[in-house]
Image (tube, grey):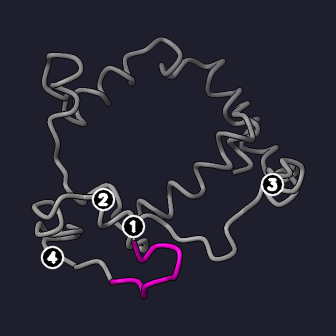
Amino acid sequence: MKTARIAGLPVDLMSNVRYYIDDHKRGAFELGAPTTDVLDVTGRPAEDFETIARRYAAQPRNQGTLGYRLRQFAQFMMAPFSLGFNFGRYDRELRRPFPSEPQLAPESNVWRRERSAADAAKPAVWSRDKTVPLPLAPMKRWNSN
């Protein structure tokens, strides 16, 4: 997170990314995937990872010039001495209510119920040629509808 702050990413973005990463680790985005959303919205099929990576690597700002390498090295050396984000302070300053028992998407029965029965029947997580089912969370009183 320190390098994200050095790179100038805003605290509100990184505050949400930490939850996104936890959701991703638990397989929230594999349930019901793949979809045709990109095709439906853009009229073109989604690009594969290699195409996106090649386009990103070809951008001038990602070329390995001497100045770029020196700047990256300087930022790397400064990172241990830089302050990271203080998410606890950020959350307190927002003064918004937080759930008493927060749940990530795959652990929420409401979230899982909102997915179609066909999506729920598909394998939840694919990892190294193994399918791992998502654990069922116990019913909570606010999501038992």
> Mark 2 or 4, which is nearer the eye?
2
How far is mark 3 from mark 1, CA to CA? 25 Å
Residue hosting label 1: 110
Q: Pick the residue in front: 13 or 57.
A: 13
Q: Which numbered disc flags the more N-terminal residue, 3 or 2? A: 3
Task: Left or right? Give the position of 118 relative to 5.
Answer: left
Q: Amino acid at mark 1?
A: Val
Q: Pick the residue in front: 128 or 42.
A: 42
> Mark 4 or 3, which is nearer the eye?
3
Residue at coordinates 38% horizontally, 63% vertically from top-left? 111
Q: Amino acid at mark 4?
A: Lys
How far is mark 2 from mark 1, CA to CA? 6 Å
> Mark 3 or 1, which is nearer the eye?
1
Residue 31: image x %, image y %?
24, 60
How far is mark 4 from mark 3, CA to CA? 37 Å
Q: Amino acid at mark 2?
A: Glu
Q: Which residues are magenta?
A: 136-145
Residue hosting label 4: 130
Residue at coordinates 33% horizontally, 83% vertically from top-left? 135
The reply to whether the C-beta atoms of the residues labelled 4 and 3 are less than 8 Å apart is no
Q: Which numbered disc flags the more N-terminal residue, 2 or 4? A: 2
Residue 101: image x %, image y %?
63, 77
Mark 2 element type:
helix
Residue 56: image x %, image y %?
39, 23
Q: Residues within 10 Å of mark 4 (few under 14, many from 20)?
A: few
Q: In this picture, is 126 found above or below 19?
A: below
> Mark 3 or 2, which is nearer the eye?
2
Residue hosting label 2: 114
